[in-house]
Amino acid sequence: MTRFIYDQFAKDYLSELLSPIGQVTASRDVASEVREIDVYFTPSTATQDYVEMLGILGKMATTTALFEPFRNPVSVGEVCSCLSKLLDVRAELERRSRRENTRCEEADLPKLWILTPTASETLLNGFHATPDEENWPRGIYFLGEYLRTAIVVIHQLPETEATLWLRILGRGKVQERAITQLSALSVDNPIRAIALELLYKLQSGLAVNQEQQLEAEDRELVMAIAPLFQQQLEAAKQEGRQEGIQEGRQEGRQEGIQEGQRSILESFFLVRFGELDAVLAAFLTPVSALPATEFTMVLLQLSALTVDEQGIQQARQLLAENVLRMRFGELGERLPVLVQNLLALSAEELTLLLQQLPQLSNEELLARLSD
């Protein structure tokens, strides 16, 4: 179900972006019944530059806050549920204050930010939600002062850099334009790197569910994210060029490209499968030597695999095939057997053999991997 995939993406996304400036708790339980706050944030001493880079999201994170993102337009009942969570947290803080005999200041109580792609005028009017365009951009509607709540209508936000990190959580064309704007940011932007990793994970999750007939909007999102793989590779190539210029050696350029591709592949496996086992780790260096176009195709093929043991095994086979073809060309009907025998080696033996591949001839490879 793609809604769960989007929900998890939104929680991970907000948690990762906010963690450098405070404490983040995802799926925080409230009250005695089983209910969860999507993201509960408590600010800490933070680098002002990073807060400013977050734009409007950074401004929201200057106080303790509850973030409740919705993939579909929020309903009246969902707004009421969010308000109930906020009031539960408020009551919890007031009880703690009484126990500790401290003062619970109104300004210290958390704020609730409800993030929704769209919202009807009927819903906004029903909650007396009004804009505050003197202090906040259009698209953000505040409930009564003591409710400490705002409804953020993402598709109404101005398309500026200050709102970018919120518009990534939109949908359809709004989200796609935000991804395009994200791709145009400097490659050394730390938030860009975080967002890209999570978008890769979102794409992988959607790719796994392709057999469930993704909606056109979801398919378009997968296509919007896919070019970012190539962009990351171009950045790695540029980094390699700079390194080569600085060192005055062609080897420096090539090493820079390969190191960039290796870093992308390693991050991909950690995000995709949650781990990097010894077999996959052994292939990082040889696969990173693939030409950029072939490397991109490998990443796209990997993103379509299932996130389970079968998917991991298929990933190993895919990497093995590409490494052997890169070094020895087309091996024809011998390739499946060679891949099978290669993957049958222990992790230590595999690592050693892969290190020796550049020096092996076809005959030596066949001898090493013969039945």
Image: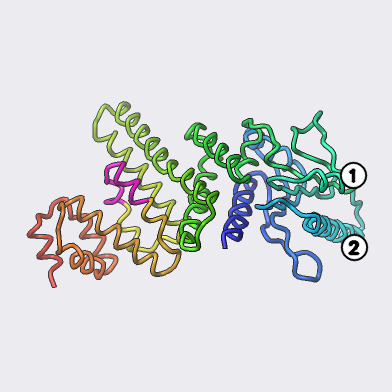
Going by the numbered disc 1, the residue's amino acid type is Gly
The percent position of residue 143, horizontal first and vertical second, equals: 86, 44
Q: Which residue is mark 2?
A: 99
Out of 238 and 170, give the one closest to the viewer. Answer: 170
Judge from the rendering whether residue 353 lies leftward or rightward of residue 2; answer left or right: left
C-beta proximity under 8 Å, tags 1 and 2: no
Which mark identifies residue 324?
Answer: none
Judge from the rendering whether residue 370 lies leftward or rightward of residue 56; answer left or right: left
User: Residue lying farthest left?
Assistant: 363
The C terminus is located in which quarter? bottom left
**Residue stretch in magenta:** 285-299
Out of 324 and 51, give the one closest to the viewer. Answer: 324
What residue do we see at 15% from left, 51% from top?
A: 329
Going by the numbered disc 2, the residue's amino acid type is Arg
Q: Main secondary structure of the magenta part?
A: helix
Helix or strand or loop: what does disc 1 sit on? Answer: loop
The percent position of residue 243, horizontal first and vertical second, equals: 33, 31
The N terminus is located in which quarter? bottom right
Judge from the rendering whether residue 163 lies leftward or rightward of residue 212; answer left or right: right
Q: Which residue is mark 1?
A: 144
Out of 156 and 42, give the one closest to the viewer. Answer: 156
What residue do we see at 18% from left, 68% from top?
A: 337
Q: Earlier in the sequence, mark 1 or mark 2?
A: 2
The percent position of residue 7, horizontal first and vertical second, equals: 62, 56
